[in-house]
Amino acid sequence: MANNAAVRTSQRGGAMTQATRRQFVAGLTAAAAPAAEGAKPNILWITCEDTGPHLHGCGDEYSVTPNLDALMKRGLYYKNAWSNAPVCAPARTTIISGMYPPSLGAENMRSETRMAPGQQMYPQLLRESGYYCTNNSKTDYNLEEPGKVWDESSPKAHWRNRAAGQPFFSIVNFTITHESQIRTRPHVWKHDPAKARIPAYHPDTPEVRKDWAQYYDNITTMDGLAGKVLEELRADGLEQDTIVFFYGDHGSGMPRSKRWPYNSGLNVSIVVHIPKKFQHLAPPEYREGGVTGRMVAFVDLAPTLLSLVGRKPEPYHQGQPFMGVHTAAPRPFNYGFRGRMDERIDMVRTVRDERYVYIRNYMPYKIYGQYIAYMFETPATAVWKKMYDEGKLNAAQRKFWETKPAEELYDLDADRDEVNNLAGSREHRAVLEKLRQAERDWIMRIRDVGFLPEGEIQARAGADAPYVMGHDGKRYPMKKIVAAAELASSLRPGVEQQLVRLMSDHDNAVRYWGAMGLLMRGEPAVRAQADALRKGLADEAPYVRIASGEALGRYGSDADARRALDVLVALAPADQTNAYVSLAALNAIAAMGQRAKPAVAALRTMNVVDKRAPKRAAGYGVTALKKLLADLSV
């Protein structure tokens, strides 16, 4: 371009002639013309399921992805992009809202809640700006749609259906890479399973190798489909008018990637191509074929879209634009989380900088690999657990089937598979404290309501959105609830009397964490503080009764276990309590193991379906009960 030549002349120290100066000014004017005339870019998102940074262009030599590699050569690759959640529904909730689901009460898999009054999903904001917005076709949000969101959301949705001259925002999503497609058989492998890289945490077996190879086969198939969409864009003469994004919705669908907020579950490959006419919207680091370590995440996508179309992010957005007219300065951290995954309850928060990942486990007494029926359909999961039961795994491979520490810290430069926990390393103490503080600052800043049990979030919110409840200090005294959770989950010895005092607090969430703290410390603490837990069995709050019941049911005397089982069985019928209390009670009963056998008859006739609950969440109790009865019949 003429202005580039002028810049080169100036950089060489040569004098800029009057003619050259006019040419330079004309070039700048031409470059700024789209913004000056109000021209808006079309925006196309090509997305897929369960795919981490496993494109060939990301440096993965095993992968075959020629079409997306070509896009990467014309665009910028964000190598430190995070999905915020390691599973689809919470990840997509983050995208559609531009907010962290723990602040919305929407962190748990396929829960359903609502946004606060005045908050909108990003397609609604784009439509206000004149865009035709289409989604082809997955939604899968943990939020009710606050009015009309898409112009069209269906398998037939396409930018070609817009009005003449109207700018568009379109998503084309491919499901061929989903976890369920890794285990689809029969299959003819194109990638040689013998050449697959097996991460340190997986056993090297034929089943694991075949699953990894099929994952890469599916990525290649997806790449071909993406190529067809890009060809449609070219055929329509829109390539120079359209900003193109590519990303997967979280890490790979293989076990310990999907569902776990390690880097392996959160790292995705965001690629963005900006055509020349819209280069004024590019961030400073933009280079064709470039790679950036800038921290970006799904929470940033909504504000980035608004920035690309000339709008400021909304005040409630918790992310920041990483391109467009309102590009923000890079931030030092990315954040992630894990809540309930299908029928199993957990709570994890995580933070990373460019090198390290910090993980805070708020329920460390639970094993990583809790039984999730859907996950166990993958052959790699089943053989991995079988080998654990048979004592055939090494230390790195065993870890997934054992309980968690309170804190984890991994050096991604030295330990890409995140198996060497540095949380106890003196050498890394400063890094641990920095990231620990970053996690605390983040949860307080977003008003994380996930420190309440799932059903309690709904109960305290009432007719309000959980976000509104979370910003009400009377309904959610966050500081003391978080302090209780941190103490309970710290696993520090010698704090049992503090935990007992928590069980007398007037706030039931504090009492819940007090009981949880005793449960997490196992038999010695439970036996020593049995009186407090017996009192907890009669607490007015169901979650305090459940935590106390699990503690006594697992570690108390035989008499205490029988009494605890009676309390838990009374809470388990979903038609008498609700879907969330029922599921928590069923999980607690399952944790009792064979001590729960006296409840088999009652469990067999129990209704665990809450017809008042959102349809997607209502079925998890059935899955949990089926597994519970199977285990008790052994």
Image (tube, rainbow, N blue to C red):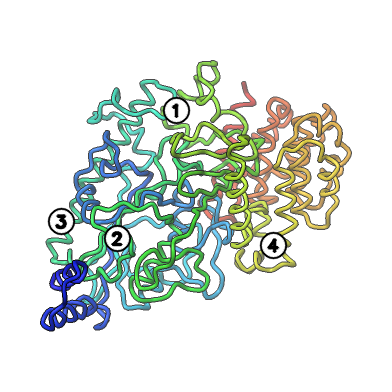
Residue labelled with disc 4: 460
Residue type at mark 2 is: Tyr
Q: Nearer the viewer, residue 324 or 554?
A: 324
Numbered label attached to residue 286: 2
319 is higher (above) or lower (below) than 365: below
Residue labelled with disc 3: 231
Residue type at mark 1 is: Ala
Q: Return the x and y of residue 452 as percentages of the image width and height.
A: 67, 54
Label 3: which secondary element: helix
Residue labelled with disc 1: 200
- Residue at the image point whose x is 79% and y is 34% from the top: 552
In the picture, the quarter occupied by the C terminus is top right
Residue 598 quadrant: top right
- Residue at the image point whose x is 58% and y is 55% from the top: 613
- Residue at the image point whose x is 13% and y is 66% from the top: 237
Sequence order check, earlier mark of 3 and 1:
1
Residue 28 quadrant: bottom left
* Label 2: how many Cα within 10 Å (few below 14, some 14–19, many 20+): some
Sequence order check, earlier mark of 1 and 2:
1
Query: Which mark's residue is nearer the viewer, 2 or 3?
Result: 2
Residue 526 appears left or right of 318: right
